[in-house]
Image (spheres, helix red, strand yellow):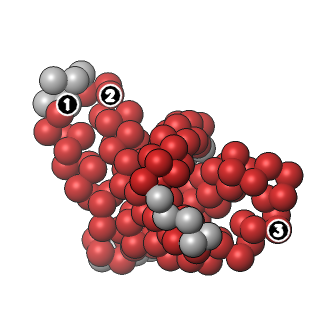
Amino acid sequence: MFDKAHFGRVVNFSINIFLGIALVLVGLTLADNLQPMIFWQSFVVSVGIGYTVCDLIPSPAWGEQFARKAGIRSKLLFHLLSTAIAGVVLIVCISLGCQFVAFGGAVFQVWPYALPYLLIAGYITLVVFLPVCKEIAGFLTR
């Protein structure tokens, strides 16, 4: 369906769909403002910001490099650690961008309080769905 060269783009786009759902649900639930129209608007913004951030910042490579240098041999521990490193960088950037779009200059009055919840939800989403997204990308880029 797609050329092998697009494997990373397919992973990036698909993981940002899952991250967008998770981060938007958490953010809107914390704001007590979970409504369908607001969800979809925030979701589109989140996927757009997330795709751009993931394309510009090679944090998954940083996470894998850190796990390799730490000497992690277990496949599960390697995945958990490399995802944690990548997740912190990506979730901080994506959530800050989305919160800035939503709150403008008042972002730092809101974002620090939501960040721990967003990090937890984002990390769980990445741990669970990143392997799924890699499988999807592998299937689509045969």
Relative horizontal placement of residue 36, taking residue 1 as reference (left or right): right
Q: Which amino acid lies under the numbered mark 1 shown in the image of this protein?
A: Thr
Q: Are marks 1 and 3 in contact (CB under 8 Å)?
A: no
Residue 1 falls in which quadrant of the image?
top left
Residue 14 falls in which quadrant of the image?
top left
- Residue 55: % across, % down: 52, 37
- The answer to which of 116 and 59 lies nearer the viewer is 116
- The answer to which of 43 and 19 lies nearer the viewer is 43
Q: Residues within 10 Å of mark 3 (few under 14, many from 20)?
A: few
Q: Residues within 10 Å of mark 1 (few under 14, many from 20)?
A: some
Q: Residues within 10 Å of mark 2 (few under 14, many from 20)?
A: some
Which label's residue is closer to the chain start, 2 or 3?
2
Q: Which amino acid lies under the numbered mark 3 shown in the image of this protein?
A: Gln
Q: Is residue 119 visible?
A: no
| Foreground tag (1 vs 3) | 3
Query: Which residue: 20% across, 31% down?
Result: 141
Which label's residue is closer to the chain start, 1 or 3?
3
- The answer to which of 66 and 142 lies nearer the viewer is 142
Q: Are marks 2 and 1 in contact (CB under 8 Å)?
A: yes
Helix, strand or loop at mark 1: loop
Helix, strand or loop at mark 2: helix
Residue 123 against residue 5 in the figure, above or below = below
Q: Report the residue marked by disc 1.
A: 141
Query: Which residue: 56% across, 65% down?
Result: 33
Q: Report the residue marked by disc 3.
A: 109
Q: CA distance from mark 1 to mark 3?
A: 43 Å
Q: Which amino acid lies under the numbered mark 2 shown in the image of this protein?
A: His
Q: Is residue 138 visible?
A: yes
Q: How many marks?
A: 3
